[in-house]
Amino acid sequence: MRPEDIQQVGEELAIKWDDGTESFVRLETLRRCCPCAGCKGEGDIMGNVYRNPNKTLSPQAFQLRRIASVGGYAIQPIWGDGHASGLYSFEYLRRVAEAEGKGSNEVME
């Protein structure tokens, strides 16, 4: 599954998938689901995950500047606060979109 088209519509990202499905993901949700180690935490060899539980995001953190394509497998959002280290594989992006559609935050955990 791959996105055929991705556009920002207001405070949402609209995604048209190659299977005909359309998804809408709030930019805040997309940012809060950032998969980078700085946002999600990093695991050690014992399986412990270390993250900054007190990380506060500014309003600029939810403003999307642009989206870069990464190979044929991911997108890289560049956010208003300069954050750009999260690579969202198409598979992960689809999971975020499906969770958003169900009103679930299971991807964020």
Image (spheres, rainbow, N blue to C red):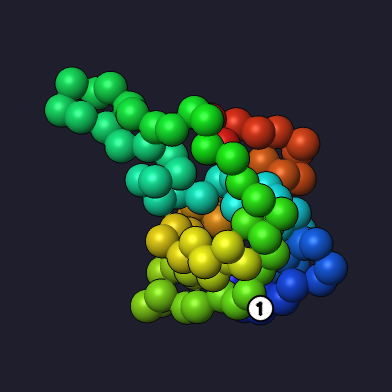
Instruction: Name the spot of residue 47 as percent of width and height, x first.
Output: 24, 23
Please report the residue visible at 49 percent of the width from the left and 62 percent of the height from the top: 83
**Type of the residue with mark 1:** Asp
Residue 63 visible here: yes
Q: Position of residue 74 (x, y in %)?
A: 45, 67
> Between residues 90 and 62, which one lies in front from this camera angle?
62
| Disc 1 element | strand
Q: Is residue 66 above or below residue 87?
A: below
Height in image: 53 above or below 24?
above
From the top left corner, tell me how far across and down residue 98 is, in percent: 67, 46
- Position of residue 58 in the picture relative to residue 102 (left or right): left
Left/right of residue 27 with respect to residue 56 in the rendered view? right
Question: What residue sits 56% from the left and 75% below the top?
Answer: 67
User: Which residue position is annotated with label 1?
Assistant: 5
Above-or-below relation of 56 to 1? above
Q: How many marks?
A: 1
* Residue ID at (77%, 62%): 12
Disc 1 packing (10 Å; few <14; some 14–19; many ≥20): few
Considering every residue shown, the one lying at the far right of the view is 10
Question: Would residue 90 be found to the left or right of residue 58 on screen?
Answer: left
Q: Which of the pair 52/75 is nearer the observer?
A: 52
Q: Tell me residue 76's x, y (percent).
A: 48, 68
Looking at the image, which residue is at 80% across and 62% down? 11
* One can see residue 22 in this view: no
Q: Looking at the rendering, which quadrant does residue 78 occupy?
A: bottom right
Q: Where is 45 relative to 5, above or below?
A: above
